[in-house]
Image (spheres, rainbow, N blue to C red):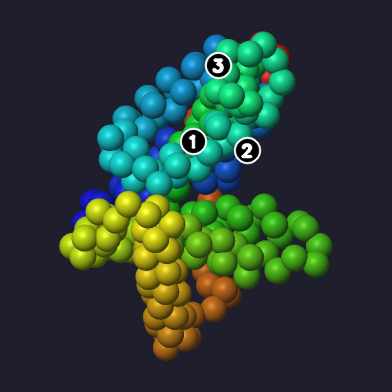
Amino acid sequence: MAELTLFGYQAGNSLLHRFDSRFKLGFLFLLSIGTMQADAWSMAVLSLLCAGLMRSTGLSMVSVCKELRYFFILLALIFISRALTTPGIPWLTFGGIVITRQGVYTGILVCWRILLVIGLGLLFVSSTRTSEIRAALTWLLEPVPFIPASRVSTMISLIVRFIPVIFNQMRETDAAQQARGIGNRKNPIYRLQKFMIPLVLSVFRDADKLIVAMDSRCYTEKRTAVELAAHKIDWIGLFVVSGVSLLAILL
């Protein structure tokens, strides 16, 4: 059961669990901006901070990397494209293909930033209940005109709740492929086709089941929201995170 909820809420009493969900949304926003503007040294500090928070919330780095193994393929493609298209001093040359030093550095930094933002988002999801995410989004969107705050927040919270289901379907599809020997096929396009089509069908099938279950229980967005209250620790956390983000941008 722990594997099924790896990318969902993890019960705990860590410092991150005790923060108000509205402030945690602000932390995620500020740190994401800081990450996108940070250099390598600032990224190293933010990565250590993220790893420490993951440890405190009970997330295993090995399990997280294992679950993100397919996403690393996308990161590899981003790195290759940056290494080949960024102009600069040639580092390696293969015929007409030139890999520059600036391209390698930029590719590593871009992939590092994306991975760190994903880690920050995972910390937010794993330390915040779905009901608290919905309440924070409703509070944030209510002042915005022409936006149904309750409906939008309900949709986003359902998406967050559905993430563990998608990863579970990925594991089941991968296990089914291995059992049928598809993983031994040399054609990567064939393997990808046999993986993606069953995965998409399974995800949509589970989504249909969820919709039927919600309709049968008369589920609507007009529900009693969780009461949110800010405390002293939330304001201290906002001050610290704002300072860290500002330093990451300026240094």
Q: CA distance from mark 3 to mark 1?
A: 17 Å
Name which residue type carries label 1: Ala
In this rendering, which labeled residue sits more in front, label 3 or label 1?
3
Would you say residue 218 is visible in this rendering?
A: yes
Question: CB under 8 Å between callouts 3 and 1?
Answer: no
**Outermost residue, left side:** 179
Give whichever of 197, 250 is nearer the camera: 197
Query: Which of the 4 quarters of the picture holds residue 230?
Result: top right
The image quadrant where one finds the C terminus is top right
The residue wearing badge 3 is: 92
Reading the chain from its start, which is encountered first: label 3 or label 2? 2
The image quadrant where one finds the N terminus is bottom left
Are there few (<14), some (14-19), or many (20+) residues within 10 Å of tag 2?
Answer: some
The residue wearing badge 2 is: 29
Reading the chain from its start, which is encountered first: label 3 or label 1? 1
Check the image and report above or below for 202 versus 10.
below
Reading the chain from its start, which is encountered first: label 1 or label 2? 2
Q: Residue at x 53, y 39 (%)?
A: 77
Q: Position of residue 103 (x, y in %)?
A: 62, 21
Q: Position of residue 124 (x, y in %)?
A: 47, 43
Are there few (<14), some (14-19), or many (20+) residues within 10 Å of tag 1?
Answer: some
Check the image and report above or below for 4 versus 87.
below
Q: Secondary structure at mark 3?
A: strand
The residue wearing badge 1 is: 76
Q: CA distance from mark 1 to mark 2?
A: 26 Å
Q: Secondary structure at mark 1?
A: helix
Would you say residue 109 is visible in this rendering?
A: no
Question: CB under 8 Å between callouts 3 and 2?
Answer: no
In this rendering, which labeled residue sits more in front, label 1 or label 2?
1
Check the image and report above or below for 240 versus 22.
above
Name which residue type carries label 3: Leu
Q: Position of residue 185 (x, y in %)?
A: 29, 56
